[in-house]
Image (tube, helix red, strand yellow):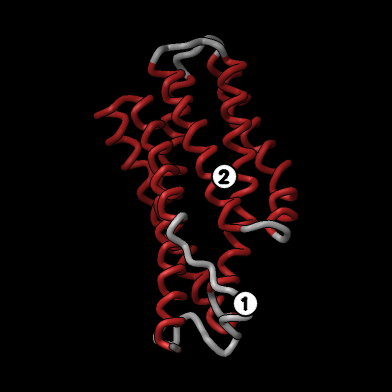
Amino acid sequence: MFLERRKIYHYNFYILLFVRLVSSIGDRVSPIALTFAVMKLDHPVMAIGLVFSIKTIATVMFVIIGGILSDRISRKKILIVADFVRFVSQGLTALFFLYHLQNIALLLCLQFVSGAAQGFFRPASVALLADIVDKDHLQKANAMINISETLPTVLGASIAAVLISVFGYAGAIAFDSISFAISCLSLSFLQIPNINEFPESVIFAKSF
């Protein structure tokens, strides 16, 4: 029974690690592709400022609400919904550039929605880690998560350059959308342990 419980902790953590890695790769590719794509619009300098500002504002606005909700409803559901919303919004953004639309208001709405979903995702993801990792190993688990998010930061520009050269700006943004679809699907396999069923003495990784 103990080994079976420990397997579940390992299983959940590595799913979350994979999700953060995949999402981070998309997150590093998208801004680069988006910058070059926006340069094709009318008034590109103003458009770039607005697009990135609106997304950041949305994230800041909703991260507090996301933190409150993550203490009240299923964190797994919050993550899945947030990734699904980002999958749709970034997919529509890719179509926006694929069809060479010039409606900046529509683009701003899509990025606001994407930023808002990111605001919900972040606190729920942090809180979920504490649910699936014993507190004695939380620091080490956080370090692994941070490494998984640092690698895409280093490689993001190279990956973006390859994707843009092969698939164009819309294709690179579509890659970001697909990364959220993969993340959403992966999160559905999480098996969140019941606190009463898995006491603190049952830890996530004695073999860490």
**Which amino acid does the dot numbered 1 rest on?**
Ile
Q: Quadrant of residue 186?
A: bottom left
Amino acid type, callout 2: Ala
Q: Can you give x and y, in whole percent of width and height, for residue 172 in the image?
A: 36, 32
Quarter occupied by residue 32:
top left
Return the residue nearer the eye: 138 or 74.
Answer: 74
Q: Residues within 10 Å of mark 2 (few under 14, many from 20)?
A: many
**Residue where numbered disc 2 is placed:** 82
How far from the left and from the top, in percent, is residue 3? 40, 87
Q: Is residue 199 left or right of residue 182?
A: right
- Residue under the point 69% across and 50% down: 66
- Kindly give the residue lying farthest to the left in the view shown: 166
Vertical side of 125 occupied by 140: above or below: below
Give the CA separation, mark 2 to mark 1.
24 Å
**Considering the numbered disc 1 on the image, is that residue within a helix, a strand or a loop?**
loop
Mark 1 nearby-residue class (10 Å; few <14, some 14–19, many ≥20): few
Mark closer to the chain start, 2 or 1: 2
- Secondary structure state at the residue bearing disc 2: helix
Residue visible at 44% across and 88% down in the picture: 1
* 41 vs 88: above or below: above
Residue at 40 percent across and 51 percent down: it is 22
Could you tell me residue 144's position as x and y percent?
45, 69
Is 93 placed above or below 142 here? above
Question: Relative to 150, does residue 120 appear above or below in the rendering?
Answer: above
Q: Is residue 32 left or right of residue 193?
A: left
Position of residue 40 measured from the top left corner of the image (x, y, whole percent): 44, 14
Q: Quarter of the image containing the C terminus? A: bottom left
Label drawn at residue 195: 1
